[in-house]
Image (cartoon, rainbow, N blue to C red):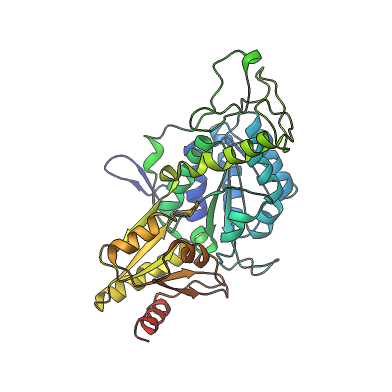
Amino acid sequence: MPLHRTTPEGYPVLFAQGNEACVYGAIHAGCNFFAGYPITPSTEITEGMAREMPRFNGIFIQMEDEIASIGAVIGASAAGAVAMSATSGPGFSLMQENIGYAYMVQLPLVIVNVQRAGPSTGLPTKLSQGDTMQARWGTHGDYTAIVVAAATVQETYNVTIRAFQLAERFSTPVVVLLDELIGHMREKLVLKEIKRLTPVQRTFPKIPPEWYFPYKEPLDMVAHPAPVGEGFRYSMTGLIHDKSGFPTAIPSEVNHRMEILKNKIMMHCQDIWNWKEHYTEDAKYLIVAYGSAARAARGAVETLRNRRIRVGLIDLKTIWPFPYRPLPQIAEKAKTKRVFVAENNMGQLIHPVREALPQNIKVHGIRRYDGYSLDPYEIVQLVKEKIYA
């Protein structure tokens, strides 16, 4: 990737794809293991990691499919590596069982899903946000997900770094949810974190192995199982287990384990939630979106504002856990009357938005699912139709 120039502070400036930004974000975050299988439209991430991992003393493996890829990433994480994979819709579907396993055994890892139109093979080269709910509910059982998103190339770099930090902080899988437009578009990218970032490093217990319980939670409820092969021997199973890692069916221990897995995330939502607000202070009407849909919505908001229509935008950078508390607070403060949810699918994000808001606020969907991005003018027209109806 050519280096065009540097900022006055000395940060490299590139003209890069979103997928390339993801590669640099992963490397600067400390990623030292990647396993994946090329799939449109995420292939540039796999290619970039194949090129860059050896340069940074990391390991790259191309696996035979996405099931093997997520299995290799789990194994690497268990051994202490900072690990990730990248895929798109069909591959993300194949990973779901092992995402649940990583969640149960509390291993940090990052999965990047550059969404494309589906279901099945769908439209491999076209965009979609059809995996919004799959990222939350894809794996079976009760599962609390951390899913982050980006709407620009710069944000893709920043969000990828944050995904590794969240994965390590909460010892859990974290999904970076991009889409084809964000992955393939080129924009200015400033590698701001290259000089000031402390890369993620796996922590080791500070007690003798014979005293060690891998799932004995501290006050913040987050267990950090020791890397295998370092003298700390324990059972690592997808079965519900006690603090030693051995399976249990005792109701109180089962309840405790399930509640810990949920609450270690939900009790720290303030540290996980992230969004950007545009003109929300007096927004009589709000648009909620993420990714490429948020880019289109931003343009629509600017146009509507120029026409003296008080519209604001909430651009989500954390999708799950969904900001159930902040969203109604923003709407209440601005005395919002209507909320529009812009998304490239048949209507997925609209459901948690409806759940979060009081019934006196009307919620409308703005949807496109033909493989092409939402048009700002289209959003403008739909918003005007509703507010003047």
Decide if residue 255 is on the left or right side of residue 351.
Answer: right
Judging depth in this view, the residue of 140 and 177 nearest the camera is 140
- Who's the residue at 57% across and 29% down the image? 224
Q: Position of residue 62 (x, y in %)?
A: 69, 44
Instruction: Left or right? Give the position of 222 relative to 97.
Output: left
Q: Position of residue 306 (x, y in %)?
A: 25, 75
Q: Is residue 279 visible?
A: no
Q: Quadrant of the C terminus?
A: bottom left
Name the residue located 40 percent from the left edge and 38 percent from the top edge.
194
Q: Which residue is painted at 70% across and 24% down in the image?
A: 234
In percent of the image, x 50 and y 48: which residue is there? 22
Rendered view: 368 above or below 99 = below
Q: Nearer the viewer, residue 126 or 223?
A: 223
**Can residue 183 be seen at all in this image of the molecule?**
yes
User: Number of marks in the image?
Assistant: 0
Q: Is residue 256 above or below residue 346?
A: above
Question: Residue 346 at x, y = what percent?
Answer: 57, 72
The reply, left or right, for residue 64 in relation to residue 310 is right
| Picture quadrant of residue 186 | bottom left
Residue 267: percent from left, percent from top: 47, 41
- Depth check, front residue: 278 or 124: 278
Outermost residue on the bottom side: it is: 389
Question: In the picture, residue 310 is in which quadrant?
Answer: bottom left
